[in-house]
Amino acid sequence: MSEQRLAALGQAYLLPQNAPQADSLAEVFADSLWAFISIPSNYGETLPSVRNLSVQLPDDQSFALYTWAVPHENGTFAFHGFLWNKNWKGQTRLVLEDYGTEDAPYRWLKGGQWVGSICYDILTTRHRGKKHYTLLTLRPGPTYNTKYIDAIELDTRADKMHFGSHIFNIRATGDEKYQKRPYRLQFRYSNTLTAAVRYDREHRGIICDHLAPSQAELKERWFTYGPDFSYDRIHWNQGKWEIQESYPLIRNLDVAPTNNRIPTNLDPDR
């Protein structure tokens, strides 16, 4: 299985004329991708020509995360993912299962479950000699999109790894109020707009558009939310992510993800 063949299979289920067969064509793509990553020498290949797929690795290349979405005619998406960790004992590759979004901030997910989304960056932070991996992801939806700041804890075996972590010392991001310490952060906004959630080295943190409704009376109707031209900064401090609201950002940020290997036909800028 070559990268060029994967690219062709990945585009097949996205073509409008193939919409009725999208799910079956997507299965062929998934099976072919699984065959590709079953070859050890393919570890670390980012497959830039496979434009329906996002392949992300942390700086130390300790694991590879493959995520993609299959659009449905009703405007919804099915989310898929594989995780490859060549250092795991026993099984080194894992099929991910979309848990969905119900109570997403509070779910500590094991057994290959994850909040289905397209990963566009992986950040590595350290505290007391331990590495922490933070994921920036996008979940498009029919009326609003959601960006997540998630986490993955690998452990030594596939059946022990999980998504989500208690590294977020944050109880609110704009109108997103967390009832308890979250395992991940979420940012919901209209799918007709763009919103930045991206790491910026100059500012040493994750710069986020502050999101607000188009009218005050539409609070928590997420399809009305968009940037209000102010910013928040989420920064790493003593083993936790913390938030600095109304961050004095001098220049506007490019809202595109920091890594362009994300499916462009799903409007990743959102």
Image (spheres, rainbow, N blue to C red):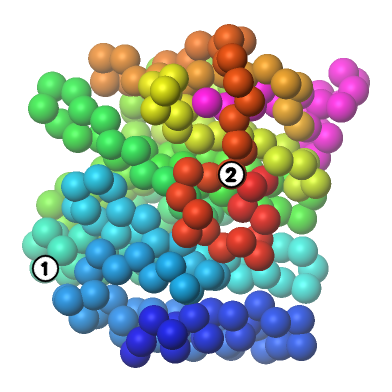
Residue at 90%, 23% (x, y): give it.
215
Residue 112 in sight: no
Left or right: 43 with respect to 244?
left
Residue 100's disc number: none
- The kind of secondary structure element at disc 2 is loop
Identify the residue at horizontal 61%, vertical 61% (top origin). Answer: 264
Toward the viewer: 270 or 68?
270
Q: Is residue 212 magenta?
A: yes
Relative vertical location of residue 216 with respect to residue 10 in this rendering, above or below:
above
Count of numbered badges drawn on the protein: 2
Cα–Cα span, label 2 and label 1: 38 Å
Amino acid carrying mark 2 in the image: Ala
Compared to residue 176, the image places residue 138 above or below, namely: below
State the image coordinates of residue 57 (x, y, percent, origin top left). 30, 54
Q: Position of residue 40 (x, y in %)?
A: 17, 76
Name the front one of labels 2 and 1: 2
In the image, taking residue 60 as reference, residue 119 lies left or right, namely right
Residue on which disc 1 sits: 90
Q: Which residues are magenta?
A: 207-225
Q: Is residue 34 among what the camera can see?
A: yes
Label 1: which secondary element: loop
Q: Nearer the viewer, residue 62 or 82?
A: 62
Q: Position of residue 220 (x, y in %)?
A: 77, 28
Where's the N terminus, which quadrant?
bottom left
Badge 2: residue crowd in 10 Å (few <14, some 14–19, many ≥20): some
**Magenta span includes 215:** yes
* Front residue of 73 and 7: 7
Which quarter of the figure has residue 90? bottom left
Mark found first going from the N terminus, 2 or 1: 1
Per the image, the residue denoted by label 2 is: 256
